[in-house]
Amino acid sequence: MSTACETAYAKINLALHVRRRDADGYHTIETLFAFAEDGDRLWLTDRPGLAIEGPFAVGLDDADNLVLRAAQGFVALTGQGGEMGFVLEKNLPIASGIGGGSADAAAALRLLCHRFGRALDDPGIQDLAAKLGADVPACLRSRPMRGEGRGDRLIPVAGLPESMPLLLVNPRQPLATGPVFAGWDGVDRGALGHGDPLTVARNGRNDLETSASTQMPVIADILRLLADQAGVSLVRMSGSGATCFALFDQAAARDAAARAIEALHPGWWQMPSRLR
């Protein structure tokens, strides 16, 4: 097995404004992407195919996984990498609003680009990432970005505090993206602001929270419980849910919140981390 390994960093939508539903059924959004220091792990191997392990491996299809689709796209683009394979350690819940599949695909592209000397900003690689999914271009960089259009028109963002303590919470229930977007009420509540990213995030919102909470009421319970914790700086649902997150001023407050939530809801998934 190759020793090359990448973290597929969990994606966080600090804010997500849905501006309109387009004629093709997609949505125009404005979002502020950030990323946790932790996530899935992906190894590049010399054995073709994909092996999946880890706490959320059950139920994943290794024959139609975004990792393999990314690899196939890379081979078609470059003529390289057809002999390579992957081992995926699936640590993030599936269909949870934190970009697990997109982050995995992005990690595969980073591994292959590094192995075969391709630049991540190569237009062909960027186009491939966009074709794999709207969140994949942001996950390829895994740095703070403002996303517009379908979330794939990216503008780098400076000033977000690195290493800010972060807690992710998910009820261990998958929530499909399509129905949540379909449940959006169609009301444009205004643009995402500009300026200091943490201020922009605090002044922003996630326009999908109402739809997601209607379909999965426990999301509202998680948001309320996170908001009740000491030392919280920002609480929000990420993406289309059901994962919610809280930013904290201090790691000790984050860890105390994690212990309190674990005591109340031991069946929920949690991931204490930090912004990268």
Image: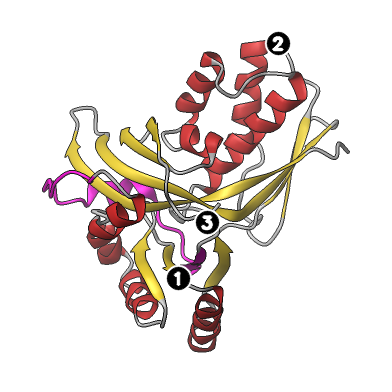
Residue 275 is tagged as 3
Name the kind of residue labelled 1 in the image. Phe
Q: Give the structural element (helix, strand or loop) at label 2.
A: loop
* Earlier-in-chain disc, 2 versus 1: 2
**Residue 251: x percent and y percent?**
55, 73
Q: Give the structural element (helix, strand or loop) at label 1.
A: strand
* Earlier-in-chain disc, 1 versus 3: 1
Circle 2/circle 3 CB separation < 8 Å? no
Residue 79 is tagged as 2
Q: Indicate left or right for 82 with 122 as reference.
A: right
- Which range of residues does the magenta coloring cover? 165-193
- Give the quadrant of residue 141: top right
Q: Nearer the viewer, mark 2 or mark 3?
A: 3
Q: Quarter holding the N terminus?
A: top right
Circle 1/circle 3 CB separation < 8 Å? no
Name the kind of residue labelled 2 in the image. Gly
From mark 2 to mark 3, how far is it between C-alphas? 36 Å
Q: Indicate left or right for 84 with 269 as reference.
A: right
* Earlier-in-chain disc, 2 versus 3: 2
- Give the quadrant of residue 50: top right
Q: Nearer the viewer, residue 163 or 35?
A: 163
